[in-house]
């Protein structure tokens, strides 16, 4: 697929994916969602060498300021449900991607932008970042997983308040509530994300993949998170990586993991 709204840059095994619709505050239109689906469903899985992916937005004003509301005007109940299901499927591809995905957030992360950030495994916020799910101002609700993931990160009571009022919160409050992992100056978000990815890359890659799977299993209605942990623990103990990691620990040296 030829990407029109995504910019891809790779350096030292870290891929930076930029939503590139700066004039529209990087709003998620249909084309952008289709490109995200192709990238995480087809392109990224073939890049087996990657340490991880950073998702960010073009410019300084917004990570993603929401969905493209002009595309909502022709929706009816059936089309709205189809749009919501498609958006959830795209964001599940991100949430379930087998290598770490970090959102580097500057400026507005609202509506679909907040939902995109929450679908990533970690979030680094510039101190100018603003998060919110303001869909109620349009008489609708979040449709790309926002009602579910916001509760997971900050709890039912505060999530319900933000979802019903449509209020925005700043980076420091997002950090206090547990929505973001770190707050840094706006020009340092990508560098902080790279720092974390490079740290994770020194760990056992199979173990990292299984961490993603088991953490996600906790929130899946059709999965038993504890059973997932048992299976994943068993899987990792049967790997060469585990034998190398254990030997390195005993021999007081750095492990040389190979993902096997």
Image (cartoon, grey):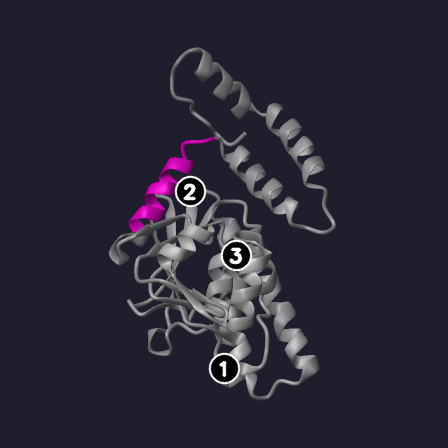
Range of magenta residues:
190-203
In the picture shown, does residue 258 fall above or below 16? above
Residue 152 makes an appearance in the image? yes
Residue plotted at (48% across, 29% down): 258
Q: State the residue lying farthest toward the top.
A: 251
Residue 41 makes an appearance in the image? no
Residue 69: mark: 1
Residue plotted at (53% across, 52% down): 153
The verdict on residue 235 being magenta is no
The mark closer to the camera, 1 or 2, is: 1
Percent across and percent down for residue 77 are 69, 82
First in sequence: mark 3 or mark 1? Answer: 1
Percent across and percent down for residue 111 are 49, 70
Percent across and percent down for residue 159 are 55, 61
Cβ atoms under marks 1 and 2 closer than 8 Å: no
First in sequence: mark 1 or mark 2? Answer: 2
Q: Secondary structure at mark 1?
A: helix
């Amino acid at each position: 697929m030829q990407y029109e709204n995504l910019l891809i840059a790779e350096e030292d095994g870290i891929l930076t994916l930029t939503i590139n619709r700066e004039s529209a505050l990087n709003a998620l239109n249909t084309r952008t969602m289709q490109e995200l689906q192709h990238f995480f469903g087809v392109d990224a899985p073939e890049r087996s060498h990657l340490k991880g992916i950073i998702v960010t937005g073009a410019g300084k004003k917004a990570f993603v300021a929401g969905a493209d509301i002009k595309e909502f005007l022709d929706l009816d109940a059936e089309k709205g449900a189809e749009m919501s299901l498609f958006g959830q499927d795209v964001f599940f591809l991100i949430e379930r991607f087998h290598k770490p995905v970090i959102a580097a957030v500057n400026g507005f992360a609202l509506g679909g932008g907040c939902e995109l950030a929450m679908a990533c495994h970690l979030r680094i916020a510039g101190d100018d970042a603003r998060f919110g799910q303001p869909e109620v101002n349009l008489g609708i609700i979040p449709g790309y997983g926002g009602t579910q993931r916001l509760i997971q990160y900050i709890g039912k009571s505060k999530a319900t308040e933000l979802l019903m009022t449509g209020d925005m919160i700043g980076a420091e409050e997002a950090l206090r509530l547990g929505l973001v992992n770190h707050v840094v100056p706006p020009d340092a978000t990508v560098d902080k994300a790279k720092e974390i990815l490079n740290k994770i890359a020194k760990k056992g890659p199979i173990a990292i993949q299984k961490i993603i799977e088991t953490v996600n299993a906790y929130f899946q209605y059709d999965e038993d998170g504890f059973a997932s942990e048992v299976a994943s623990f068993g899987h990792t103990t049967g790997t060469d990586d585990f034998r190398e990691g254990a030997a390195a620990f005993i021999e007081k040296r750095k492990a040389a993991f190979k993902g096997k």
